[in-house]
Image (spheres, helix red, strand yellow):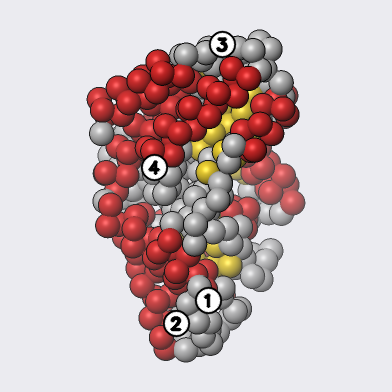
Amino acid sequence: MPNEEMLLIPGPTPVVDSIYDALAQETRSHTDARFAAVYRDAIAKTREMLKTDGEVFVISGSGTLAMEMALINTVAAGEKILVISQGFFGDRFIKLGQAFGINVDVIHSEWGKQVDPNEVEQKLANGQFKAVTITHADTSTGVAADLDALVPIIKKHGALVILDGVCATAAMEEDMSKSYGAPDAKIDVVLTGSQKAIGVPPGLAIVAFNQTALAAREKLPSVPGYYSDIYNWLPIMHDPQKYFATPPVNLIYAYNEGMRLVLDEGMENRFKRHEAYGKAVRSALSIYGMKALASEEAAAATLSCILYPEGIKDASFRASLAKKGLIVAGALAHLAGKAFRIGHMGNTTAEMLEKAIVLIGETMNEQGQAVNITNAVEQFRLEMAARV
């Protein structure tokens, strides 16, 4: 199935033929042994990617459902969480917690910057927090969290680490067996979705719990959810022929193929590729006088929020790109109209990104900016050659 457009937004991301082919397979019963074998394999691949010693859940739903599952299965009403917010999607945990009677405190960073670890240390030292949420790569700002700095502080104060990997998983390291920054400083929960760096169509909520997080669930007498209760899903994750709620059969086919591609490439190779993409895109766009919101030290590997130079009109700029077959996203909140967001993750290729640099340059020239496309492309290639 040919992709008629280059979908370079922060998700959904481009889907390749083998995933489309898997998606188009014959729909079978959700209890058919042949489907169950595929589902079982997809779950095993997810476990391999995240390296958890606990349980993995792959179910129908969005990344927001995965956030809800992570929260209500570890934190009870009346308990406290600290939200580390580096943008719009970090803030989503605030409303989620409040919806379930959880006491929420929050540390906001300035958009485009990382949260100060010293502020996290001070906050945790002055309160009893059950868990701390971190957005690994905030889709609104393109800022990545510094796990080596944050995770040891959180674990020192006895809180669970809940990592929102929606815009990072399969592109930025999220190894639940690894200690980050200090001995035994590990991530307890990782949540994500299917449609970003994994490169599969939207529709799957994916959550992994380690043994510490599972012990927290065991201490809860109940959770304020039915579909979101991991205890209702455990039997199916262990034996997919059992029934709780009908899984999206064809999407599981596609996800299993997507996970095959992820693991066949190799996690370290994926991390290096995505880092190279991000640096090369931002460096090339700087030739056009465009500046990334996040500094290179804080920038995510999966997407970039790019500030417009004076004179670019957001709506017409993105509409012109769309007519050329390149789809980028607008900015959110107070940055709306002042920036655009470009994804460089998943099944995206260097060839696609280089073409995007050309189309962006052409569109800027059309709007009277007089930029040098040849120099920008050369810069993109130099950065890629130096890093891959």
Give the CA separation, mark 2 to mark 4: 31 Å
> Would residue 124 appear left or right of 275 to someone viewing this image?
right
Give coordinates of residue 167: x percent, y percent: 51, 43
Above or below: residue 337 compared with residue 159: above
Q: Secondary structure at mark 2?
A: helix
Q: Give me the disc on residue 35.
A: 2
The amino acid beneath tag 3 is Ala
Number of dots carrying numbers: 4
Q: Secondary structure at mark 1?
A: helix
Indicate which disc residue 249 carries. 1
Q: Quadrant of residue 37?
A: bottom left
Q: Is residue 261 left or right of residue 68?
A: left
- Quadrant occupied by the C terminus: top left
Residue 195 against residue 288 in the figure, above or below: below
Q: Is residue 375 above or below residue 181?
A: above
Q: Is residue 107 visible?
A: no
Kind of residue indicated by mark 2? Phe
x and y percentages locating residue 116 in the rendered image = 50, 21
Q: CA distance from mark 1 to mark 4?
A: 28 Å
The image's mark for residue 370 is 3
Q: Are marks 1 and 4 in contact (CB under 8 Å)?
A: no
How far apart are labels 1 and 2 at the CA level?
7 Å
Q: Which mark is residue 349?
A: 4
Choose mark 2 or mark 4, whichever is in front: 4
Amino acid type shown at disc 1 = Val
Between 318 and 157, the one nearer to me in the picture: 318
N-terminal label among 2 and 4: 2
